[in-house]
Amino acid sequence: QVQVVESGGGLVQAGGSLRLSCVASGNIFRVAVFAWYRQAPGKQRELVADITTGDMARYSESVKGRFTISRDNAKYTSYLQMNNLKPEDTGTYYCAADLSPGPVSDEYWGQGTQVTVSS
């Protein structure tokens, strides 16, 4: 069994910062890719950022320059540092841990953590 747990969400004013954490635990040898998604009310879930074991990171255009994804392989943990937050960043943030390095994913999801940015 594999569990993924996010934490660090909360209420923050526009321009503020939050740091989200994602911990994967259980029967894990390696997390190939950590990915952060978010879903705003009434909208589809979107990819915010992801990072490979080699620390190759990708970002959506809407967060580039403001968010930073990182990981600690020894702790099976990923972080999402969010700076200069905007009201449109509000949503539930989910972490996905893909254990498969190949083309077929073996992905596990957390329950999400709420981020609310007030104007």
Image (cartoon, grey):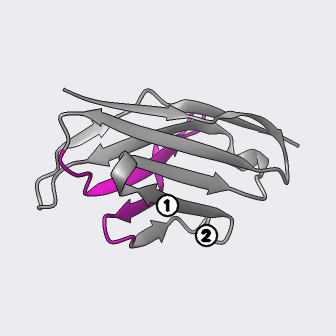
Q: Which mark is residue 24?
A: none
Q: Nearer the viewer, residue 113 or 42?
A: 113
**Residue farthest toward the front in the current orientation of the protein:** 74
In magenta, the rendered stretch is 29-55
- The residue at which mark 1 appears reads as 70
Can you say whether 60 is above or below 38 in the image?
Answer: below
From the image, which quarter does the C terminus lie in? top right
What amino acid is found at the position of numbered circle 2 in the picture? Lys
Residue at image position (17%, 47%) is 29
From the image, which quarter does the N terminus lie in? top left
Quadrant assignment, res 42: top right
Marks 2 and 1 sit apart, C-alpha to C-alpha, by 14 Å
**Circle 2 — which element?**
loop
Residue at image position (63%, 55%) is 81
Residue at image position (42%, 55%) is 72
x and y, in percent, of residue 45 in the image? 46, 42
